[in-house]
Amino acid sequence: MAQVLVRQLDDKLVERLKKRAKEHGRSLQSEVKTILEEAVPDYEGAWKRIAKLKQTLEQAGRTFSDSTPLIREERDR
């Protein structure tokens, strides 16, 4: 697994991170990792999960229509 080193962080920032980590019951490293994961979501993975769910629902007989005309109609009102 990769590592990232961030240099020259303001001491006050580190203290705020430590406080936040303590509030969440995590280590400083875990808190920073969580912040980074939330800041840079895995969109590719999310779209794959959405496609898989749609496929599962379609196999169960669900149908999905294109809502574009409805949205345009509503927008043009």
Image: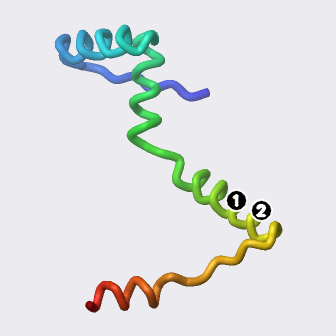
Q: Which residue corresponds to the image point at 61% horizontal and 51% vertical from the top-left?
A: 45
45 horizontally vs 29: left or right: right
Residue 53 is left or right of residue 65, and the answer is right
Residue 76 at x, y percent in the picture: 28, 91
Q: Counting other residues with Cα less than 10 Å from the Cα at mark 1, is it few (<14), some (14-19), or many (20 or more)?
A: few
Q: Is residue 38 above or below residue 23?
A: below
Q: Are marks 2 and 1 in contact (CB under 8 Å)?
A: yes
The spot of residue 69 in percent (x, y) is: 45, 90
In depth, the one of 76 and 16 nearer the eye is 76
Frontmost residue, 77 versus 34: 77
| Quadrant position of the N terminus in the picture | top right
Residue 74's spot in the image, x, y percent?
34, 85
In this figure, which residue is indicated by the disc labeled 2?
Answer: 56
Q: Amino acid at mark 2?
A: Thr
Give, as a three-letter code, the residue at label 1.
Leu
Q: Residues within 10 Å of mark 2 (few under 14, many from 20)?
A: few
